[in-house]
Amino acid sequence: MKTVKVKFRVNNEPVTLQVKPYETLLETLRERLSLTGAKEACSLGACGACTVILNGIPVRSCLILTPEVDGMKVTTIEGLKQGEKLHPLQKAFIEKGAVQCGFCTSGMILTAKTLLDRNPKPKKDEIIRTISSNTCRCTGYKKIIEAIEIAAK
């Protein structure tokens, strides 16, 4: 089978891989790079469990082919903490108990991060709109929204 050489950055680290042309970014992250924060759930891009940040934009890694990220920057949930210091969103999610089963958490946090990067003080309705593309089956979203509001302060 023909493979494609791909060079990109993951969590600020350079990566060079030979991948199959149809390999998804989710598969590459989880199976080749052991970055398991992005979860495979619907495999249709509908739930957001596989969300990563690609060049500053939240994307569904189950819908992106790895060859498409050549030359780009990928941030996963594992890339948010600095050494042992958690990102303010990660801390807020823990503090507010916004982590139930944890399956959606990385996608929620990364989606929220892109919101706070472009608007450090979002209003509640903007937070709700932003995370509406991510599905959580455990909570009523109240704690998630509160965690994002705390991180924005």
Image: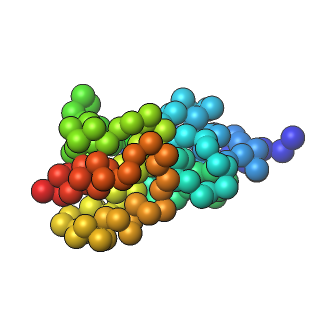
Q: Is residue 27 left or right of residue 138?
A: right
Relative image position of residue 18 (x, y in whole percent): 69, 40
Q: Is residue 7 above or below residue 95?
A: below
Observer able to see residue 64: no
Choose between 50 and 96: the one closer to the eye.
Answer: 96
**Which is nearer the eye, 5 or 79?**
79
Image coords of residue 149 (percent x, y): 21, 57
Residue 139: x and y, percent? 39, 46
Q: Name, please, the residue furthest toward the left.
A: 153
- The residue sitting at the front extreme is 140
73 left or right of 50? Answer: left
For image coordinates 87% across by 41% down, the residue present is: 1
Which residue does the image show at 24% across and 28% down from the upper left? 84
* Side (left or right) of 7 relative to 65: left
25 sits to left or right of 103: right
Q: Residue at x 49, y 46 (%)?
A: 137
Taking the spot 44% from the left edge, 63% from the top edge, the residue there is 132
The quarter holding residue 90 reads: top left
| Quadrant in which the C terminus appears | bottom left
Taking depth in this image into account, of 50 and 53 the one nearest to the observer is 50
